[in-house]
Image (cartoon, rainbow, N blue to C red):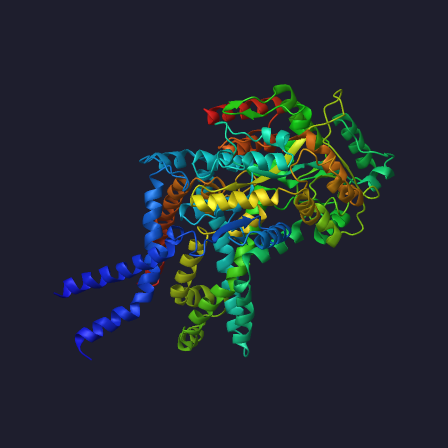
Amino acid sequence: MSRREHRVLGWLFTSPYLLYSLVFFLIPLCWAMYLAFSDWNLISPVYNMVGLGNFKKALENPGVRSAFWVTYKFMAFFVPIVVTGSLLVSLLVNSLPRYKSLFLVGYFLPYLASGVATSLVVKGVLSYNSPLNEWLRGSWNLTIDWLGSPVSALLIVAVIIAWKFIGYYSLILTSGLESIPTEVYEAAAIDGVTGWSRFWRITLPMLYPALFTVLILSAGVTFGIFTEVYILTKGGPDNATNTWQMEIFTQAFSKLDAGYGSAIAILASVVTFASIYVIRKLMEKWGDRYGWE
Amino acid sequence: MYKCKKVMAVVLTAGLASAFLMGCSQETTKTTTQPDGTVTIDFWAAPNPPQQKYWQQMADEFAKENPKVKVNVSPMPESPSSEAGIQAALAGGSAPTISENISRGFAAQLSDSKALVPLDTLSDWGEIIKNRQMNNTISSWKFADNHQYVLPIYSNAMLFAWRIDMLKQLGYNEPPKTYGDVMALGKKLKDKYPDKYVWANPDLTDPTWWKRWFDFFMLYDAASNGNKFIEGNKLTADDTSGVKTLTFLQDLGKNNLLLTNQSTDPFEKGTSVWTTIGPWTFSTWKEKYPELKFNESYVLSPPPVPDGMSTENVKTFSDTKGLVIYAQAAPEKQKAAMQFIKWVYSKPEHDQKWLEITNLPPARDDMNTNDSFKSYLSQHPELQPFAASIPNGVPPVDNAKFNDLQTTIGKQAVNPVVTGKSDPAAAWNAMKKELQGALK
């Protein structure tokens, strides 16, 4: 095959992906950028270019401000829960003598569950007249407004999404655990390093590449939460669960303000990029301590 | 040379993509009339099976008498909402010829954006109104520019349902009619059943715009005797009635008579004794709660009113939706659409069929007098209070900014009052200030 044919073949093979990216990513992105500087509602034949007006309006909007802080509050709940949970599952599965794959597949199943179905089940379980709440009232005289309090609503959403992702992340961590050479543990055992000390001084540092991936992925998830919040709380109470995606949805699809919604989407992507960059740098610093580059 | 080839490849890929996209977007520029003279019109029905069934039947029957017009009925996209689906279709140039399920507020927004055909400028409009006996009904649907953009299909005066079986246990034979009566009933309920509530409605803490139709506006329309909340671009809300409405909501909350926690079917399961109700609820109850019987387990009533007010002919919010013709449609399609609408509303039997299939009262002046409906209503007594309340229905706000305006009512007034974060008068004034700013 000549060099020319090789190149044509290369383009041919990559063209589906390029076309897909162009149609579903690049063109919508450019379109959103354009919309963000206009006051177009997608219907009116007349619209104005408003410069940075939509961005200024977004920065003054309490909904956008709440989305900014809610994301970090959610991160503070979600990331520790999901990382600890998936680490525990992977350690547990890795210590099994047999049927590891079977258990891993079992834990992975929630990841395939529909967010809508999961949220509806949780909504039913936590409703005032559910068996759980009837029991709490009957036995302990306890009435809890699970989704009506800002902290518990945020925590519940974090737990649902953590439940969904723990199986997926434990797959990554299990492969990380399996890649730690047994010789390292044997050498450590000879030096008398066992139990917790072995976990903190050997397992965790050696697991760094997998943990790095899990931490970055889980931090990224917090910027894209929508389904669970939409079904369970609609962003309430008092904007306590109003995520970026919820705010974008409200402005662009509920209030039909496409230009303003696009401006918020662009702000959200800038915040996401900056936050992930900072987290990545912090993680790299942590890795440097253990000699990972 | 190599660079040039790279550029060529990118250009080629972009060209292919553009051709692909253009192929997708040119639907509306196709010839609208077939060589044999047949015109095809697209009708988007509301995304629920009964309404789709009705319009499909109408389209099939119409086709038998009018072979030159073909009506394609399909459910309107509901992703993420029917309004957003229509907006996306308009933006993509693929709007249907007609759609139903259009509220006055959304119609105001669409007409402001020149997306709708003023129906009164099309021939046959006057005849449709005359044939359907809706001269009175249609008069309140005129828009600010004096045109008619929507043909109302149904007018559904919202009512409240009371668990009469539980009320009887408390010594009541009929539902309370005034705020004072409701509070007195609430006290008796709490004394006997501390875990039960008068009203279980988590929506009262949710600022979503349309939720105000089914709580605030029902009570406000009753308290103000149908005062228009917003007229054109002017806030015309009545202060006394508004503050009384909010005070009532706050009193319910303060006395632990209001449950704002999420709960599953609280009225049906007896957690609460009061709920907002529309005629669409009955088909769900028939399937899910067949034990709920009209006049045995529940009764229907208009909203309660402030103490001392007349309890006769109480006004309430009217959930009204209609059909529109889109300006994007070619003139021959618009003409064919009017032909179809004229045919549908030429016979009261078609509205009778609508009532039978959907349970929604047709928007007609003769709903309570026409024999076509009388016999059906006598077989379905639970629908009679809805039909009787049609004259007391107050249509929704028809301002193009309806979404922002109604969100403000929730955020500034209803939500903080119910949660006890603001007192009724302060909340009312804060709401008014924000509404006046938005209406400028």
Relative placement, left or right, of A6 versus A126 is left
Relative placement, left or right, of A89 versus A292 is right
Q: Which of A139 and A36 is in front in this view?
A: A36
Q: Which of A256 and B398 is in front in this view?
A: B398
The N terminus of chain B - image quarter: bottom left
Quarter-of-image position of residue A98: bottom right
Quarter-of-image position of residue B429: top right
Quarter-of-image position of residue B215: top right
Task: Please state the horizontal and vertical placement of residue B248, each as a whole percent of the image.
Answer: 69, 27
The C terminus of chain B - image quarter: top left
The total number of labels drawn is: 0
Task: Please state the horizontal and vertical placement of residue B342, each as a whole percent of the image.
Answer: 57, 42
Please determine whether, in this image, residue A159 is positioned above or below residue B159: below
Please determine whether, in this image, residue A150 is positioned above or below residue A186: above
Q: Residue at x 42, y 54 (%)?
A: A220
Task: Please state the horizontal and vertical placement of residue A38, each as a whole percent of the image.
Answer: 35, 38
Is residue B206 at least partly visible in the picture? no
Q: Nearer the viewer, residue A232 or B235?
A: B235
Is residue A19 at least partly visible in the picture? yes
Task: Please state the horizontal and vertical placement of residue A1, each as a whole percent of the image.
Answer: 20, 80
